[in-house]
Image (tube, helix red, strand yellow):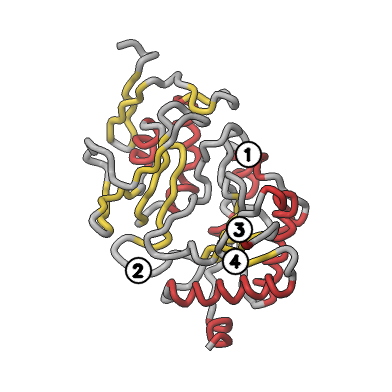
Amino acid sequence: MSEADGYTIEVEGNEIRVTNPDKLLWPEAGIRKATYLQKLVALSPYLLPYCRRRYMTTIRYPDGAGGKAFYQKRAPEPLPEFVHTAVREQVRYVVVDSLPTLLWLGNLAVLEFHPSFEYTGGEEPAEWVLDIDPSEALRGRLMEAVSLIGEALEGMGIGSVPKTSGATGVQIVIPIEAGYSFAELRKAGAFVGKYVSEKYPNLFTVERLIKNRGDRIYVDYVQHAPGKSLSAPYTPRGRPEATVSTPLTWDEVRQGADPRDYTLLTIERRLAAKGDLIADMPKQSLADILQFLQ
């Protein structure tokens, strides 16, 4: 077998077979598998903290971005010895807790990493997330809408970090102190969603049925639940532009940041300049809002 067909690399004392290194995984961006694995190495200090101790759902693109894709919850077989797993509701998930595991999945054409909201072995949420994904008609107002929700949270004394999903939406991430339940976060999320929907009724809705939303932006607080998952901060996405789910500053949101600007080809420069904006945010207390809701 020639090097063009594959080769073996050693990472942290583990051997990983790289197959078809010249395969185009993002044809429009010109990113081949070998380059993708190099990008995963660069992203790993930022991506892995949001994957450790989580049940990982991956999205594999055997033919590269733009081709057919499939979600994978069950750990693929055979598993290398260095890959750890965790079981939830009779499903054995991969736990992406090391660079070798990340690269092994990358070689399998995993282009997206979607960790669970809860930690393995428990039911406590790791953070609080509001998902904002507008209809096509309102995509141009996405950053305006996200900014208004950020202002509402700030007015409630809650610090937060917006991040692009890497696809069409934005998630607002609130790092939280330990001890809260999903039920408490859902109650707080419902309050925030209803607050902005009443204050800006032509822009926001908490209506679950798509047919009843009209051209309003849905504030999704229901998706944040045990057993659910969402794109990790710093995960690549299987989009033609090779976008990466990227935390933003609130100034960037107010200036109308374009999610398509944050890609595998630009993310390293950004991380060198900005670092991890979510890690820099102190864990938030929700005592005041939960006490108010009682």
Classed neighbour count for the residue bearing mark 2: other residues with Cα under 10 Å, few (<14), some (14–19), many (≥20): some
Q: Is residue 280 visible?
A: no
Q: Quadrant of the N terminus?
A: top left
- The spot of residue 232 in percent (x, y) is 48, 51
Q: Is residue 175 left or right of residue 180?
A: right
Q: Is residue 4 visible?
A: yes
Point out the frontmost of discs 3 and 2: 3
Residue marked by disc 1: 269
* 1 or 4: tag closer to the N-terminus: 4
Asked if labels 2 and 3 touch by Cβ distance under 8 angstroms, the answer is: no
Residue marked by disc 3: 211
| Mark pair 4, 3: CA separation | 9 Å
* 3 or 2: tag closer to the N-terminus: 2
- The spot of residue 3 in percent (x, y) is 36, 14
* 1 or 2: tag closer to the N-terminus: 2
Indicate the amino acid at tag 1.
Answer: Arg
Point out the frontmost of discs 1 and 2: 2
Classed neighbour count for the residue bearing mark 4: other residues with Cα under 10 Å, few (<14), some (14–19), many (≥20): some
| Mark pair 3, 1: CA separation | 42 Å
Residue situated in front as seen by the camera: 38 or 137: 137
Residue marked by disc 2: 123
**What SS does tag 1 mark?**
helix
**What SS does tag 3 mark?**
helix
- Please identify the residue farthest to the right as the structure is shown: 255
Residue at point 63% right, 74% down? 194
**What SS does tag 2 mark?**
loop
Indicate the amino acid at tag 2.
Answer: Glu
Residue situated in front as seen by the camera: 213 or 147: 213
**What SS does tag 4 mark?**
loop
Residue at point 50% right, 66% down? 222
Q: Is residue 24 left or right of residue 203?
A: left
- The spot of residue 289 in percent (x, y) is 58, 81
